[in-house]
Amino acid sequence: MIVTVYSTGHSCQRCRLTCQRLDELSIRYDLVELHEAHNAAVRAFLVDELGYREAPIVEAENGQTRWVGFRPDLIDALGRRLGL
């Protein structure tokens, strides 16, 4: 399963907590730093097309599961689905 965390950077506490919880459960993820210039198109899609205004945005299960913010309950549920 591919998990992607869209982050606004190291100063984002919710982004750090999300990555920390994923690490604790040994859930592998790709981290996309939305503040980096080369991710401008991704940022525009998430904000302009999908309407997200907060971070992190976590996407899993081929885009079928998506949430915003630090959601340990959803991270734990994802871990259970992965058998972790």
Image (cartoon, grey):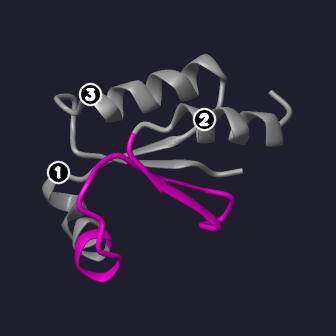
Residue 73: give its label. 2
Which quadrant would residue 45 be assigned to in this image?
bottom left
Q: Earlier in the sequence, mark 3 or mark 2?
A: 3
Q: Depth check: 60 or 80 in front?
A: 80
Q: Is residue 45 above or below residue 68?
A: below
Question: Looking at the picture, how far across and down is residue 51, in whole percent?
Answer: 29, 74
Residue at point 58% right, 48% down?
3
Disc 3 is placed on an element classified as helix
Q: Is residue 12 above or below residue 23?
A: below
Q: Is residue 76 left or right of residue 83?
A: left
Q: Which is in the foreground here, disc 1 or disc 2?
A: 2
- Bounds of the magenta span? 46-69
Magenta includes 55? Answer: yes
Residue at point 59% right, 67% down?
63
Q: Is residue 30 left or right of residue 61?
A: left
Q: Which residue is mark 1?
A: 36
Q: Which residue is mark 3?
A: 13
Q: Which is in the foreground here, disc 1 or disc 3?
A: 3
Amino acid type, mark 3: Gln
Classed neighbour count for the residue bearing mark 3: other residues with Cα under 10 Å, few (<14), some (14–19), many (≥20): some
Classed neighbour count for the residue bearing mark 1: other residues with Cα under 10 Å, few (<14), some (14–19), many (≥20): few
Marks 1,3: beta carbons within 8 A: no
Quarter of the picture containing the C terminus is: top right
How far apart marks 1 and 2 lie (CA) works out to 29 Å
Amino acid type, mark 1: Glu
